[in-house]
Image: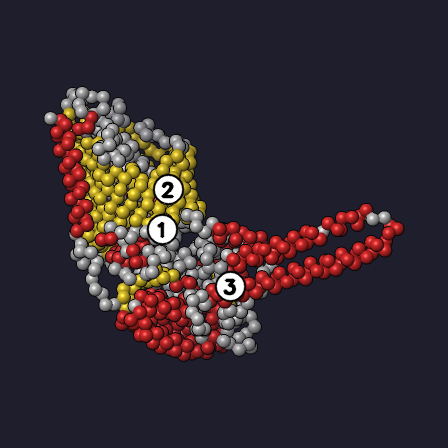
Amino acid sequence: MQRTTTHTRINRVSALAAAFLLVLALAVPSAGRAESKLQIMTATTDLASLAQEVGGDKVDVESIARGYQDPHFVEAKPSFLLKLRRADLLIVVGLELEIGWLPPLITQSTNPKIQVGAPGYLDASRFAKILEIPTGQVTRAEGDVHPLGNPHYWLDPENGLRIAKGIQNKLSEMRPIDSAYFAQRYDSFEQRLKQADQRWLADMKPYAGRKIVTYHRSWPNFAEHFGLNVIGYVEPRPGIPPSPQHTVELIAQMKRDGVKLIIVEPYFDLKTPNSVARQTGGQVVVLTPSVGGEKEITDYFKLFDYDIAKLKQAFDTVH
Amino acid sequence: MKRIAVLSAVIFFSAAASAQQAPPAEPKKDVPATQSSVAASEETRMKTLEDQVRTLAEQVTLLRGELKAMRDARSVEPRSEEPILLTAAHVAPGILAPSAPAAVPASPEPALPQATQTQIFGGASSNAKLLNPDISLIGDFIGAAGRNNVSPSPSLELHESEVGLQAIIDPYARADAFISFGETGVNVEEAYVTFTSLPAGLLLKVGKMRAEFGKVNTIHNHALSFIDRPLVTNNLVGGEDGIDDAGFSLSRFLPAPKDWFFQGTAQVFRGDSDDLFQARRRQDLSVVGHLRAYRDLSESTNLDLGVSYARGHNNAGVGTTFDPSRFLTNLYSVDATLRWKPLRRAIYHSFLFRNEFFWSARDQVSPATVFQTEHAFGLYSDAEYRANRRWTIGGRFDRSGHAANANLTDTGFSAILTYWPSEFSQIRGQYRFGHLADPVTTNYSNANEFLFQFLFVMGAHGAHPF
């Protein structure tokens, strides 16, 4: 009698489990929808803007991180999974920028197309000129270092162009039928970006060689392209919050070198930069490193328009 | 890789050459003064050799500079055939101030200083290790002071050192292993392979893993909001390791209304999890089911809900007159988490409010030797607030019956303060009060304790669970 009861129970358990699995497996019709547009997800808004430039109306693009968000610290929210699940292509910044949040999203997305190394996974850093690749011993005594180089490389319009070229090649590979369209979009983007870059360089030319301080190491590519000289950082080490001792040293250095400008990303606290500015007679300028950092920055062009206008204005006030 | 090898070879040969040229200098000491002319000619020969070495060294430096330039150039335009540099970028010399960095990208960098020679060798060897998994070690040091008569913990202990090994196995799978070295020995906390490319949106995990039962059960010790686990984990869900067993896990997104995310998980385990589940026979498998519902309330606030079920055999019938296979434990749980994290200030401020409710139905033999099912309930409710980049405060309320004797109910609360020197270490202090029942004597006593913890992370820091 007892035996029978046990068996019945076990059977019931297995039946329950099987039913549950079945429900899981059959609940949703498998994703066989005929999408005419390529679904692109990007890690950041800048890559989204570049992908949109090249893809035009043949693609739907969405970024996981927002432009005013620190791209190192994005939460791996399940709502992103729904979007990643449908993506044909995932474009990432790479260089371990997203190491703290993207890997579990990719794994859990259950989307074979965008797994690392799959054809729908594109690491944009492969196309860009990378700065600050550490040589020799790399330890966390240097803070949250990126052993593969500085991941904020999109802030150089030349890199923007290189990434766009990479995206064009990838899109053409995924949709050969539209390759002429993507090529034409890229050519138009290249032409417009080169024109814009000439304007930006001309705008920045009077300030070439100016020394600045930035909060985080987000601006080496920007500084190199526009001829600025970053001499110090508000953070004592990347990812380490400002310390009193370092701030004192920074103030002394800024006074010595006559540095008046402190660039801060929109996601950092302004308390320390403001106090440094007060003591050095300088000015804090909040520049956004990404598209969408402010409402009016809706694309890659407006990003530089905005940052350069703000920078010009700040240079003119302090000197 | 090849370049580095070539480079290493060049350096090695130049080093070897200088080493070979050194010995002829030795006999010089033994040369008598009368043979000074011979010595002089010897010296000139030495000089020439030295010059040769110097020239060679210079050539090596030059070669290295060229190699570096080549590497830079390649990293600049790895794929595209035609040059896509901006015309405006080719700034003629003199346009920029001399101190400004050159805007021309592929300019060869100056030769590296002498000191970097060894680093190049190091680079080569680390390249050889590129296929190693990401390795990390998390040290968890805990101290305790105060009084606890029911479940005392040591004054000082390296509670565990968790080694994490994570890698992509092949295009279809990745694997994660977490091996914890504790005071009592080594334990494979988790080691499983995840198949990421299955059809129909299925995600399969195979191995030993923490069961998807509620929230706190899935979290590793070092990632908890508090130094300890809530009372209910110990009383109803099998102790610190919770439901952690070998088996299969299958999960899938489920259809959901707009803006909602539903996920279902079904797991089958061997049925051995601490003293919660025990499998005496092969068919004594345990099962776990979990349904998760998630919704973004705004871009900074979200709600995470879950219901869980677990069922397995227990050992209450062993040594009694009853058939041991009749004794089962059914566990139910409901969890709700509210999170707030403003995106513009995500590293400075956040808030988390988490509640979990548990119900345990355990078959056992009563003192009057009657087969009965003991129903015990437990819950915890905790809140955590990040006040600034370095400080987090939190509080927790605990209440839980004992699985084997629901008349005994433990109550407690905790307050915790965490200091983060960086992302990779934490220093914490926790005050814990407990009104705890001794399961043997059934007497209650109060526990007043101060716990402190040092956590440190070495190596690749994996993503934190959400």
Please report whichever mark, 2 or 1, sits nearer to the chain's N-terminal start: 1
Establish whether labels 2 and 3 are both on one chain: yes
- Spatial CA distance of label 2 from label 1 is 19 Å
Label 2 residue SS: strand
Position of residue A299 relative to residue A42, above or below, is below
Label 3 residue SS: helix
The chain letter under disc 3 is B
Colour scheme of the picture: secondary structure
Who's the residue at 56% across and 58% down the image?
B6
Who's the residue at 20% across and 56% down the image?
A30
Residue B178 — which label?
2
Q: Amino acid at mark 2?
A: Phe
Res A173 seen here: yes
Position of residue B307 relative to residue A232, above or below, is above
Dot 1 alpha-carbon crowd within 10 angstroms: few under 14, some 14 to 19, many 20 or more = few
Q: Position of residue B181 (x, y in %)?
A: 40, 36
Residue B170 — which label?
1
Q: Amino acid at mark 3?
A: Arg
